Image (cartoon, grey):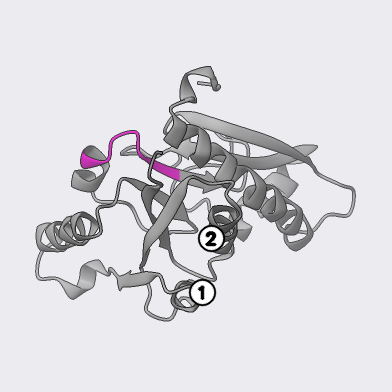
Amino acid sequence: MNLPAKLAVFISGGGTNLQALIDSAKAGRLSAQIGLVVSSRNDAYGLVRAQNEGISTFVYRAQDYQTPDEGTEHLLHILEEYDIEYIALAGYLKMIPLAVIRKYKDRIVNIHPALLPRYGGKGMYGHFVHEAVLASGDRESGATVHIVDEIYDHGRILMQKKVPVNPGDTPDSLAERILAVEHQIYSEALEQLIKGNIKSWKK
């Protein structure tokens, strides 16, 4: 019997995608044990979600270290301490240190609230993405799960699902429908990654 993969989830805010991953793991839809939640903020509600589930937490802020390298080394040490095999970014708004990306090559994933490669890159997160989609007049948007590399929202696409843009949509109404899709496909994509089924996915 294969043991569940050890997963760390990185957050910066409320952690609704974190909760969706927790729920999927509990229901057996995700062959992973969330062993650690890393937050870029000490007041992120996602930390409360983790603590409610008995999941260990770590607040990682680059400004708390004398040098960037010192911070990166400490983060790597924490990930090793918890035997982390995969990392899922769930609303994490900081760039992952290069050394972490290299160590976990092809094992770090992110979910983005648009159909990449459109509406990605630095500054394209949250309501900024939905505002840009509505301003463009596009008739559809959606969510994308992708591998994390050295460039924001650039890595290989693993899974996408489209969401229609309705007449009269606001950034909030569009975000709500896309978030529901995010909650669905994130655990699906992670499960396929853990099982090694990524070769059949869109590149």
Q: Is residue 127 left or right of residue 150?
A: right
Residue 96 horizontal/vertical position (percent):
30, 51
Residue 22 horizontal/vertical position (percent):
53, 60
Disc 1 crowd rating (10 Å Cα; few below 14, some 14-19, many 20+) is some
Q: Residue at x 38, y 45 (%)?
A: 3
Mark 1–mark 2 Cα distance, whole angstroms, equals 9 Å
Q: Secondary structure at mark 1?
A: helix
Residue 5 horizontal/vertical position (percent):
38, 46
Q: Which amino acid lies under the numbered mark 2 shown in the image of this protein?
A: Ile
Q: Where 90 falls versus 45 (above or below)?
A: above
Query: Is residue 174 one of those drawn in magenta?
Result: no
In terms of image quadrants, where is residue 58?
bottom left
Q: Is residue 122 left or right of residue 57?
A: right
Q: Residue at x 33, y 52 (%)?
A: 95
Q: Residue at x 20, y 62 (%)?
A: 78
User: Front-most of 141 and 9?
Assistant: 9
Report the span colored magenta. 103-109
Query: Which residue is disc 2 drawn over?
Result: 22
User: Front-most of 167 and 80?
Assistant: 80
Q: Are marks 1 and 2 in contact (CB under 8 Å)?
A: yes
Q: Where 120 falls versus 199 (above or below)?
A: below
In terms of image quadrants, where is residue 64?
bottom left
Query: Is residue 106 one of those drawn in magenta?
Result: yes
Q: Is residue 138 visible?
A: no
* 1 or 2: tag closer to the N-terminus: 2
What's the mark number on residue 49?
1
